[in-house]
Amino acid sequence: MSELEIFASAGNGLDLSHFGLTDEGVAYVVAGPFAKAMGYRDAEKATRLLDEAEKGTQIVGTPGGDQRVSVIYEDGIWELIFRSTLPSARSLKAQVKEILRQLRQTGVVDMRSQKELTRREILQMALDAEDRAEAAEAKVAELEPKADLADTYLISDGSQRLVREAAKLLGMKEKELRRFLLDERLIFPKHAPCGDVSYDFYADFAHHFVAKETVVNHTWGSCSHYTLRITARGIELIKKRLAGRDAA
């Protein structure tokens, strides 16, 4: 659990007992304590800012025994840290920014301080980064025609795409596309009794979206969650709506 110590320093009142790892190795934190540490009134207010993939539930040991509780996964943890103005969060953000700066400048991250690096090492890292950048550009140029053909196939084959897959196809971020669909009144949120937020489509767009219902059993009962997918016609509709917005 030592790899999770960095998150525990993000706010007051957090300790390693609030954190865990899924079977796939994804870090998570219990939503209630983390939301409070980040300065939010409650977990619901904090998790409302996150994408569905950034939050969920996990079985966690509590004084009353193992219980399924709301959690925030690693991407959601970073999202809330970067939104925070707390001194502890600012300190953590400064560390992350330094790592990103190293990646941009050299293409690698060396955990030694810059004073410990020799001039020769810094120069070599820069040259290596330049070589990797040139190789990447060549690879992109090689794959671009294939990517264009694949995109055309993805639309023409009538397949259904998850929102994140459609966003990638359209050159957008998942959050950006989901907000666009909400603003255009193509979809709407559905709040389950357990606090999970899913999305469904308006009846007028039945040929453009598909919402698969999954019944989730809880200790207190069951509720329905929905997974939204976008059809090929839906992707074409989104493209037209995006073009109309750009023209305006």
Image (tube, grey):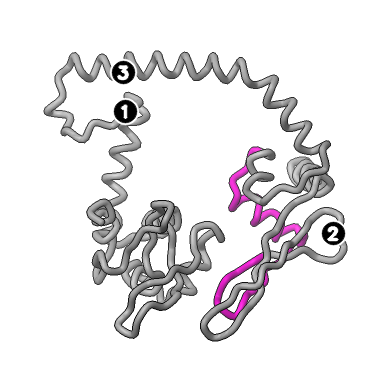
Residue 103 drawn at (x, y percent): 34, 31
Question: Which of the two labelled residues, at mark 3 and mark 1, occupies the earlier sequence position?
Answer: 1
Residue 132 badge:
none
Helix, strand or loop at label 1? It is: loop
Amino acid type, residue under disc 2 in the picture? Phe
Question: Which of the two labelled residues, at mark 3 and mark 2, occupies the earlier sequence position?
Answer: 3
Q: Which residue lies under the disc numbered 3?
A: 126
Quarter of the rendering occupied by the N terminus: bottom left
Q: Is residue 142 above or below residue 187?
A: above
| Front residue of 246 and 224 | 224
Q: How many numbered callouts?
A: 3
Look at discs 3 and 1 and give the one toward the viewer. Answer: 1
Helix, strand or loop at label 2? It is: helix
Which of the 4 quarters of the picture holds residue 148?
Answer: top right
Residue range (magenta): 171-198
- Residue appearing at x 61%, y 50% in the figure: 176
Q: Is residue 69 above or below residue 119?
A: below
Q: Can you see residue 87? A: no
Which of the 4 quarters of the picture holds residue 90?
Answer: bottom left
Q: Which residue lies under the disc numbered 2?
A: 205
* Circle 2 Cα neighbour tier, 10 Å, few/some/many (<14 / 14–19 / ≥20): some
* Circle 3 Cα neighbour tier, 10 Å, few/some/many (<14 / 14–19 / ≥20): some
Q: Is residue 215 above or below residue 208?
A: below
Q: Can you see residue 162? A: yes
- Residue appearing at x 82%, y 38% in the figure: 157
